[in-house]
Image: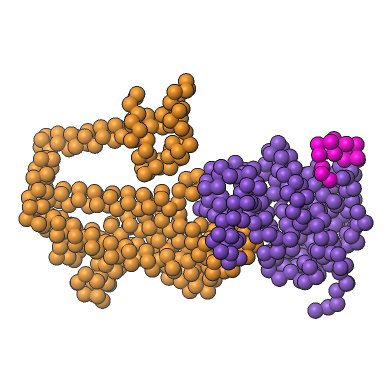
């Protein structure tokens, strides 16, 4: 582990969980390298290198095992077959269409859910009246998986886009609203008092203290909400849709087309991962001020 | 409103028969009982006492963060009604906004006051220099040590130019060395820009070293137990700290804090002739 390229060190803060190492990198001058004892940054970089290497090994190994199992007579398609099917679906445009349909639903539901959850969460945390009115409903619906409402929603809203977006909305909303509410309730009283003694009134305290102080909670809620939205989407599409990754897999199941099912699974996994990473990036950017994470 | 004993013209802060109770299961907890205290303009008063004696409650009432159950707390002859910019407060837990840099923290109160950008910048720079945080002006609080955080909090309170500083065990969480340095810096700043200071501490040495007057409180119920005038000269140098006069006062306050006879109370309303 002697390779420590500066580019990796500079990328540090952008990566998940790299906040602490990033701080070390900004405070430790390059001059440290000449000094005798190994700089803590060097060790952190080494460790990250090793982690990346193990990640890569694990992925390659996993695909290898899959391939071996497929060749050994399990009813799996081999990796090249899945890649070929994926390329074919891409060429005739089916994959793009499915991805767009699914992404459109999940993003609409998720963004609407978060957009409603944040103000409702703030209202609940700030005003006892709002808390008293909203809480029983949120607590009740929180215990019901949004999918369990799908039959009812399908009957009430028909089989268009609306019912699917609605259950996704509900999933994202419920996850995010609780977290936001807890964030607002948990804002350090001392910080509010500090703002008050500096002359700030309620409006300013809300915007300048309560919102920034609860941002970490909101973002955690959004990440949970996104996972929840994604899970709900696929299931919703399995039940009622004309396009989308879930629908494609459902169709493939009828024709015993395992390769297409694999393509769907992989596409869902990759999209979910990318969206989660984007939120994580926003989180490190927006909440890097926290003392410990 | 009932008639109040005429507060002395010189009293900057006047506390009259303040009582504060908190509900506690079926009974009520008496945090403060008949507390009266006058503090003159530019006076430095420390309050020391065992935990639970209500010293923080007293400070919160003067800061306007809490209301007395009975009695009156007045500043400049007017009843305290909520916080105000003429009273700066420094908390034990620093209470810096962790998402703002040192500069932005200090600027916070100036923005509330509606100052223009140029003036904000100038005042902020001045106070950053005053507390020696020039190098850390754009650092976030998480990068600062405890002592630096408290210096930033002090600069933030000073920046809005309050005539009164209320300090609630500001150096309580710091190591002994940093604490002594900050005590000396505080007195230095105070001697140059005079303010009325109410300083709460649990450290007898600190109480005597800083103040014109030490108010000793007792617990259950929280009340003023003793008032000790500190007629040591300013500036308080290390020489003063090691002098026999300091030791005598320290012993006097120590005995008052640690060997309290139950049920005794003292009235601190008359301003000392110091």
Residue A91, image x and y in percent? 7, 52
Indicate the chain coloured purple by its letter. B
- Rendered residue at 45%/28% (across/down): A31
A104 with respect to A223 (left or right): left
Q: Is residue B61 above or below residue B170?
A: below
Question: Residue furthest toward the bottom?
Answer: B1
Q: Is residue A111 above or below residue A1?
A: below
Look at the image and say whether residue A200 sits in the magenta stretch.
Answer: no
Residue B218 in sight? no
Q: Quadrant of the C terminus of chain B?
A: bottom right
Q: Where are the magenta residues, as a range?
A: B234-247
Question: Residue furthest toward the right?
Answer: B273
Q: Quadrant of the N terminus of chain B?
A: bottom right
A157 with respect to A179 (left or right): left
Residue B248, image x and y in percent? 91, 40
- Rendered residue at 35%/62% (across/down): A172
B119 with respect to A62 (left or right): right
Q: Nearer the viewer, residue B230 or A146?
A: B230
- Tint of chain A: orange
Residue B238, image x and y in percent? 81, 36
B135 with respect to B65 (left or right): left
Q: Is residue A32 above or below residue A253?
A: above
Q: Quadrant of residue A1?
A: top left
- Rendered residue at 60%/45% (across/down): B133
Question: Residue furthest toward the top?
Answer: A36
Picture mark count: 0
Q: Quadrant of residue A15?
A: top left
């Amino acid at each position: 582990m002697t390779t420590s390229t500066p580019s990796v060190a500079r990328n540090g803060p952008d990566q998940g969980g790299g906040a602490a190492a990033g701080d070390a990198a900004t405070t430790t001058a390059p001059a440290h390298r000449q000094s005798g004892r190994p700089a803590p940054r060097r060790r952190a970089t080494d460790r990250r290198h090793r982690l990346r290497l193990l990640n890569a090994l694990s992925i390659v190994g996993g695909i290898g095992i899959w391939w071996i199992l497929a060749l050994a007579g399990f009813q799996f398609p081999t990796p090249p077959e899945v890649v070929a099917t994926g390329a074919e679906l891409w060429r005739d445009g089916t994959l793009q269409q499915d991805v767009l349909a699914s992404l459109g639903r999940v993003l609409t539901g998720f963004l609407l859910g978060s957009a409603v959850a944040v103000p409702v969460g703030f209202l609940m945390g700030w005003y006892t009246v709002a808390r008293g009115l909203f809480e029983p409903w949120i607590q009740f619906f929180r215990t019901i998986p949004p999918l369990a409402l799908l039959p009812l929603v399908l009957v009430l809203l028909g089989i268009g886009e609306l019912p699917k977006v609605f259950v996704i909305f509900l999933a994202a909303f419920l996850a995010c609203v609780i977290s936001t509410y807890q964030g607002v309730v948990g804002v350090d009283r001392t910080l509010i008092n500090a703002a008050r003694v500096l002359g700030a009134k309620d409006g300013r305290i809300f915007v300048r203290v309560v919102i920034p102080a609860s941002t970490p909670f909101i973002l955690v809620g959004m990440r949970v909400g996104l996972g929840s939205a994604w899970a709900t989407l696929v299931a919703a599409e399995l039940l009622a849709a004309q396009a989308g990754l879930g629908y494609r897999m459902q169709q493939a199941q009828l024709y015993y087309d395992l390769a297409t099912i694999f393509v769907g699974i992989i596409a869902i996994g990759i999209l979910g991962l990318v969206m989660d990473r984007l939120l994580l990036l926003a989180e490190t950017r927006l909440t890097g001020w926290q003392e410990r994470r | 409103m009932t008639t109040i004993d005429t507060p002395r013209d010189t009293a900057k802060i006047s506390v009259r028969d303040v009582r504060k109770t908190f509900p506690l299961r079926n009974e009520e907890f008496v945090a403060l009982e008949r507390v009266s205290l006058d503090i003159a303009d530019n006076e430095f008063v420390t309050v020391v006492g065992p935990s639970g004696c209500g010293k923080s409650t007293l400070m919160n009432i003067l800061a306007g963060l809490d209301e007395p159950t009975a009695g009156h707390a007045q500043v400049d002859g007017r009843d305290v009604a909520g916080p105000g910019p003429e009273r700066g407060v420094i908390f034990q837990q620093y209470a810096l906004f962790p998402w703002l840099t040192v500069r932005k923290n200090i600027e916070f109160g100036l923005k509330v006051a509606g100052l223009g950008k140029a003036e904000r910048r100038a005042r902020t720079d001045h106070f950053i220099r005053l507390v020696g945080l020039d190098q850390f002006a754009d650092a976030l609080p998480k990068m600062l040590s405890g002592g630096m955080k408290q210096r930033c909090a002090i600069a933030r309170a000073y920046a809005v130019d309050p005539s009164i500083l209320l300090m609630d065990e500001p150096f309580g969480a710091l190591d002994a060395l940093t604490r002594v340095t900050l005590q000396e810096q505080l007195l230095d700043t105070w001697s140059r820009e005079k303010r009325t200071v109410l300083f709460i501490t649990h450290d007898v040495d600190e109480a005597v070293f800083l103040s014109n007057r030490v108010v000793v409180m007792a617990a259950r119920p929280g009340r003023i137990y003793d008032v000790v005038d500190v007629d040591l000269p300013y500036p308080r140098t290390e020489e003063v700290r090691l002098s026999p006069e300091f030791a005598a006062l320290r012993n006097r306050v120590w005995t008052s804090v640690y060997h309290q006879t139950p049920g005794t109370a003292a009235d601190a309303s008359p301003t000392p002739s110091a």
